[in-house]
């Protein structure tokens, strides 16, 4: 299902719809979540207010202790060959590197 979705996404963007997307790199969001939301909101034409930014910062700080670590399970545990999965998503991964 996901490979089909990624193929359709790539085709849709390539058909002249690039301006309909705002891409966020997950690592960027982890490093600066408020900055990422601010950039997205600006792109949408609805800038983040100071009150929203303050509230988001407070929420982020209050919930920091409860965040789970980012884990990377072994694909083989799920019956998957990681290299095969990477190959199926290769076109998307290469395009994503340019988008972000």
Image: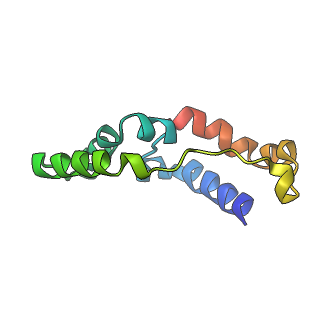
**Residue 56 shown left or right of residue 2 in the figure:** left
Percent position of residue 100, x then y: 50, 35
Q: Which of these two is toward me, 26 or 17?
A: 26
**Residue 50 shown left or right of residue 94 in the figure:** left
Residue 11 visible here:
yes
**Residue 50 shown left or right of residue 92 in the figure:** left
Q: Quadrant of the N terminus?
A: bottom right
Percent position of residue 18, x then y: 48, 47
Residue 48 visible here:
no
Residue in the image at 48% along x and 52% along y: 17
Outermost residue on the front side: it is: 65
**Residue 73 shown left or right of residue 66 in the figure:** right
Percent position of residue 68, x then y: 52, 50
Placement of 4 over or under 98, stated as above or below = below
The image quadrant that residue 30 belongs to is: top left
Q: Which of these two is toward me, 17 or 97?
A: 97
Residue in the image at 13% along x and 49% along y: 49
Residue in the image at 11% along x and 51% along y: 51
Q: Which of these two is toward me, 87 or 54?
A: 54
């Amino acid at each position: 299902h996901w490979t089909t979705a990624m193929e359709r996404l790539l085709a849709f963007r390539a058909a002249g719809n690039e301006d309909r997307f705002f891409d966020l790199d997950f690592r960027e969001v982890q490093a600066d979540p408020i900055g990422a939301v601010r950039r997205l909101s600006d792109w949408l034409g609805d800038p983040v207010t100071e009150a929203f930014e303050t509230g988001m910062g407070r929420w982020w700080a209050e919930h920091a202790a409860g965040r789970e670590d980012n884990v990377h399970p072994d694909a083989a545990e799920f019956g998957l060959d990681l290299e095969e999965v990477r190959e199926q998503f290769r076109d998307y991964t290469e395009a994503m590197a340019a988008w972000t």
